[in-house]
Amino acid sequence: QVQLQESGPGLVKPSDTLSLTCTVSGYSISSGYYWGWIRQPPGKGLEWIGSIYHSGSTYYNPSLKSRVTISVDTSKNQFSLKLSSVTAADTAVYYCARDLRGTSYYFDYWGQGTLITVCS
Amino acid sequence: QSALTQPPSASGSPGQSVTISCTGTSSDVGGYNYVSWYQQHPGKAPKVMIYEVSKRPSGVPDRFSGSKSGNTASLTVSGLQAEDEADYYCSSYAGSNNFLPWVFGGGTKLTVL
C-alpha cells in the first residue's frame, strides 16, 4: 500500500521560506511517476502547486512558479517543496500526492495534509 | 476564482440520486478525457472517486458514476447514503502546453437530508 506523509513546521513567518518534505512508503519514487504538491486554503478549494518526475524534471503552477522549488531525493524516497516569500495568502493545508500524468491523469495517493500558517 | 465551475451545494435524501456539474472550457474539460472527481470529508485528504471521466478506482462503490458532454463533466451519486455527505471537487488535466496543466473546481458540498 502506497503511503505519503508530509512533514514540516506548522508556522512560518511572513517573507520567510516554507519548506515541506513528503516521505513515500510502499513504493519507490525512482520506479516512476510524478509526485506533486497541492494546497487548500482554509474553507476553500484545491490548488495544484507543482510536480516532479522521479528523474527530477519539474512542472509548476505558473502563478507560483517564481517562488516554488520542488526537489526529489530518491535515496530517502522523499520529495520536497520550498515556497519563498510567503504571505498570509499562503496559509493552507498542504498535501503531497502521486501525480499520474502520462498514464491515467489523476492524483491517486494523497498524504494526510499538513496545515501551514503564515503569521508573525 | 477556480478554473472549473461547480455549484457550491447539492442535496438529496437517502436513496435518491444527485448530480454535480463541473464546467470548464475546450482547453481543459472539453479537450481531454482526463476529468477526475474527489471526495473530501472534513479534516481528511481528498479521495479519488472517478478518473478519466467515468472510470472508478477499485473499492469505489458503483453508486458513483461520471460522464462528460462538451465542456461540462458530471458526477452522479445514486442511492444516496449518509456517508456520501462530503465536499466533491472536479479536476481536469489541461495539457502540458496549457498555462495551467492541472485545474480544479471550487468544490460542491453534498448534503444528505
Image (cartoon, coloured by chain):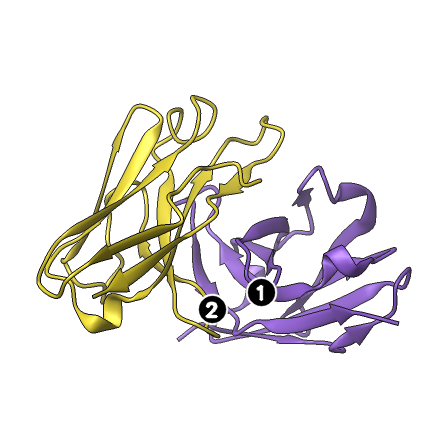
Chain colours: A purple, B yellow
Single out the residue that lies furthest toward the front: B113
The subunit letter for the residue under badge 1 reads A
Give the amino acid type for the residue marked by disc 1 in the picture: Tyr
What residue is pinned by disc 1?
A95
Q: Residue at x 44, y 39 (%)?
A: B92
Q: In which quadrant of the rendered image does the C terminus of chain B lie?
A: bottom left
Give the amino acid type for the residue marked by disc 2 in the picture: Ala
Examine the rendered structure and indicate whether residue B71 appears above or below residue A14: above
Task: Answer left or right for A120 relative to B57.
Answer: right
Examine the rendered structure and indicate whether residue A116 appears above or below residue B88: below
Task: Answer left or right for A21 relative to A98.
Answer: right
Circle 1: is it few (<14), some (14-19), or many (20+) Cα within 10 Å? many
Badge 2 vs badge 1, beta-carbon distance below 8 Å: yes
Callout 2 secondary element:
loop
Q: Residue at x 47, y 69 (%)?
A: B45
Count of labels shown?
Answer: 2
Residue A83 placement: quadrant: bottom right
Q: Residue at x 26, y 33 (%)?
A: B68
Examine the rendered structure and indicate whether residue B71 appears above or below residue B83: above
Q: In which quadrant of the rendered image does the N terminus of chain B lie?
A: top right
Examine the rendered structure and indicate whether residue A9 appears above or below residue B78: below
What residue is pinned by disc 2?
B45
- Both marks 2 and 1 on one chain: no
Q: Nearer the viewer, residue A51 or A95?
A: A95
Residue B44 x, y percent position in the rendering: 46, 73
Tell me the number on the disc at residue B92.
none
Callout 1 secondary element:
strand
Task: Answer left or right for A88 relative to A1.
Answer: right
The subunit letter for the residue under badge 2 reads B
